[in-house]
Image: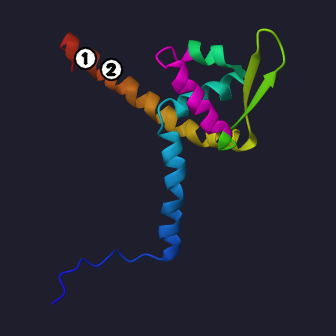
Amino acid sequence: MDDEPTPPDSTDDELTCYCRLGGVVDRLSRKYAMQILCVVNATDPTRFRDLEEYLPDASTSTLSARLDELAEADLLTRTQYDEIPPRVEYEMTDDGRELAARLEPVMEWAEERDSADDDAAGQRATGEN
């Protein structure tokens, strides 16, 4: 008798599809990655100091690392101008804009969920039902 569990019926194509998500999920799950994409998408082009204002809890080194990773992934472009003081601007690439558009429903869902949680917490605090 073989006690090995039988894997669910699936084709190699389905498994390949899920495997491709790994890189995207890894990149987007890094601290501040999605927030950076949202800010740059909304304020395109964006300077580093603007990101620092929108994300005040993020350290300079973390923001810098995420921006480098997103540029390396071809989701953002980085343009450095030869000026004093130096000026660097980040802009969305076509792939970055497409990703931001696809993330928008997720962000809306998260906002609705946060609002519902806040409403429920307010009702509990005031004793309302």
Question: Is 127 or 51 nearer to us in this picture?
Answer: 51
Residue at the bottom extreme of this rendering? 1
Helix, strand or loop status at disc 2: helix
Q: Is residue 57 magenta?
A: yes
The quarter in which the N terminus is drawn is bottom left
Above-or-below relation of 126 to 25: above
Picture coordinates of residue 73, whole percent (x, y): 65, 44
| The image quarter in which residue 63 lies | top right
Q: Residue 45 magenta-drawn?
A: no
Magenta highlight: main SS: helix
Q: Is residue 9 shown left or right of residue 30?
A: left
State which quarter of the image contains the C terminus. top left
Q: Which residue is mark 1?
A: 123
In the foreground, 1 or 108: 1
Magenta span of residues: 54-71
Hey, what amino acid is under mark 1? Gln
Could you say which disc has been placed on residue 119 in the image?
2
Q: Would you say 66 lies left or right of 112 here?
A: right
Up the image or down, 81 lies above or below 28; here it is above
Q: Position of residue 83 (x, y in %)?
A: 83, 13
Residue name at image x 76 percent, y 14 percent: 86
Of 14 and 104, the residue lying toward us:
14
Q: Amino acid at mark 2?
A: Asp
Q: Quadrant of residue 114?
A: top left
Relative image position of residue 99 (x, y in whole percent): 63, 42
Residue in the picture at 33% in, 20% down: 118
Can residue 68 be seen here? The reply is: yes
Of 40 and 69, the residue lying toward us: 69
